[in-house]
Image (spheres, rainbow, N blue to C red):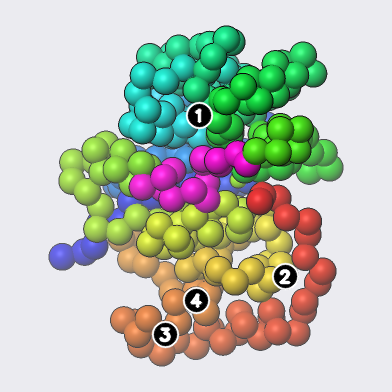
Amino acid sequence: MAMKTGYLIDMDGVIYRENQLIPGAADFIQALIATGTPFMFLTNNSAPTPQDLAVRLDHLGIHGIPPKQFYTSALNTADFLSETDPRCTVFVIGEGGMAAALHESKIANDAIRPAYVVVGEGAASMERLGKAHELIERGARLLATNPDNWCPVSSEKTRPGAGATAAFLEASTGRRAYYLGKPNGYMFHQARRKLASLAMSAPDNVVMIGDTMETDIRGALEAGMQSFLVLSGSTQLENVGDYVYQPTRILQTVGDLTEEVKTGQASDRLNSPAFAHNGAQGGRSGVRHQTDIFAFHKPRPRPAMTK
Ligand SMILES: [Mg+2]
């Protein structure tokens, strides 16, 4: 019997960039739906709600994805609080998706004596930061939805992310934030659990598809999942070798997977060295090729995106 694979799929840089669909992404999702392959979108962006994301995909040409197939770092934060401290109250810095997720989990807003200051994606006013600072000084604990210091806006432009906002409060209060979202294992374990409950039965193996080494690939590895890196987003091939953790496979885009999802036949091209000694499939040509590229081309690393 064939192994049943389920996919956790990052969005920005994997499915779209700005408001442009990545070539092949719509066909890939279509193939997943047509073959009944379990999948869920997994994003560190805590600003949108699952409904917002479903609408966005719809406008880009990927239709009919139900909101329950999106898991954001805002939902992850709400799940974390409901599980670890269900009666807590919070002061939130961030946009709609965070507020909606907390509301859904019945976690109350509190500007007087909250247990946590929660920092998510979105514009933070100096006034709001000042208030958060004051509340942390009075004992509130600092929690951030994700560690991304910056996020891509377009190919030439970035904006500050929740990690940078949390870092501001870490500096002003001398306290350390706890970061949820990818690569935190809590995000991956929750996502795997949700994926299993969406599917008729739990997939035999779960693959994370992402474009960012520090979040998607690192987190998947630490959670014991396979990871496929796509080169359609934030990571260039020549930088992959700079990381200690490596993806299971490297693909140009998710479109490279469409055929094998349709046929159920895994392709063996572009496997990275990380799993070469796994033995199961025996020796492969091609495997050494990847390391050679890295050995001879070592550019200066980009500034780290996350902490
Ligand atoms: Mg991404």
Q: Are marks 2 and 3 in contact (CB under 8 Å)?
A: no
Q: Earlier in the sequence, mark 2 or mark 3?
A: 2
Q: Are marks 2 and 4 in contact (CB under 8 Å)?
A: no
The one nearer the camera, 229 or 119, is 119
Q: Position of residue 181 (x, y in %)?
A: 52, 41
> Farthest left residue?
1
Q: What residue type is labelled 3?
A: His
The relative height of residue 10 versus residue 66 in the rendered view (above or below) is: below
Badge 3: residue crowd in 10 Å (few <14, some 14–19, many ≥20): few
Whether residue 282 is visible, yes or no, is yes
Amino acid type assigned to the residue bearing label 4 in the image: Ala
Q: Is mark 4 within 8 Å of ligand 1?
A: no
Residue beneath label 4, please? 274
- Residue behind mark 3: 277
Badge number at residue 238: 2
Residue at left offset 78%, top offset 43%: 155
